[in-house]
Image (cartoon, grey):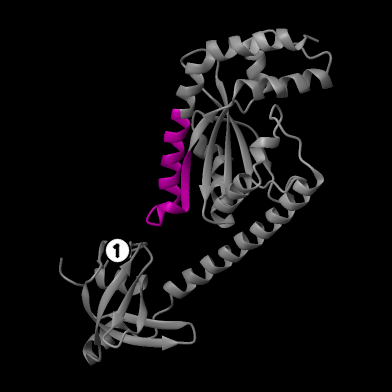
Amino acid sequence: MRNESQLKTIVERAYVERLNAWQTAAVRIKHWLTEQQKGLLKDKDISRLDVDGHRIKDAARTLAKLTEKTDDDPDLTITSAEDVEDQIRDIVGVKVLCKSPRDQSMMFAALRDPDQLGAFELIEWKDYTDPPKASGYRACHVILRIPSDQGPPVFAEIQVKTRLQDAWSELTHEDMYKPGAAMKPSKLHGEFARAMANMLATVDDMADTLAVELTALTNPEPVVELDELREQDTGIDVRVRATGPKYALAVDGSGRQGLIPAFAIRELSGQKGTIKVNDFIHLDDRLRASVEEDSKGLYYIPLELPEH
């Protein structure tokens, strides 16, 4: 076993020799993840997944983790930068933030799909959402091996979190208690951190349920044929006050707000498959629409598309 001074020298040398390769790999992964994001959310709200930058692990934390490993295994030999990378495979890290657990599961599955990885190689993955870590930490981790033209391949960790899981790390000051950091968690901190994690997980689940409900509300089955509505010409005038990929919101002359669902826009457009409502309906558009109301909500079914 090498002493800490020797390990420190090896780690410092690794950072000098490999920093450019690590940074290049991080940029490459971010670009690839952005393409994955576009593919997974084609014709949908792309903000559901956010590639949230990258980081190169601080050398002091790498040294702390490596020291812990050599203390646990006296036979472990560290002599080179390659040894450092082989033992600490999350020096390069990229984070993907998701709006909901449903989106997190979708991204996590894509990162483990060989057909999606291309030249990247899946090394290992860990699901810390069910069950979470004892601290309350929740996330999905994937370790990939990235080819490099600056020497050996680079290991990189991708963390897939919901926004609330990421907020937990900020709210509990998790970085202050990692190996190599200055503080050790107290019993009170641990209890509060776990309680906060559980509460935020409940909110995540509620948000998922609401998202599913909203999808159902904004894509209802048409009650009557649109051709029949146009023939009856029983519509009212409405103004669009908000629009997005899945639906638009409109208001009538008396201030009643209703949803303009995607199916109605798709049928009027004559297109097949998924469409983006905001490609056809813009803010402040004036429309003639039929009114449909049921137990789930109030809908304005346009009789024709506006001219732009």
Query: Vertical placement of 120 versus 229: above or below?
Result: above
Query: Vertical placement of 71 versus 55: above or below?
Result: above
Magenta part of the chain = 27-52
Task: Tell me residue 46's x, y (percent).
Answer: 41, 52
Please indicate, yes or no, whether residue 35 appears anywhere in the rendered image. yes
Q: Which quarter of the rendering shows the C terminus? A: bottom left
287 vs 197, left or right, is left
Task: Tell me residue 6's x, y (percent).
Answer: 71, 7
Name the residue at 53% across, 39% down.
Answer: 95
In magenta stretch: residue 235: no
Name the residue at 48% across, 13% down.
Answer: 150
Name the residue at 66% across, 25% down.
Answer: 61
Q: Which residue is mark 1?
A: 278
Name the residue at 48% across, 72% down.
Answer: 216
Query: Vertical placement of 73 versus 267: above or below?
Result: above
Task: Tell me residue 107's x, y (percent).
Answer: 54, 47
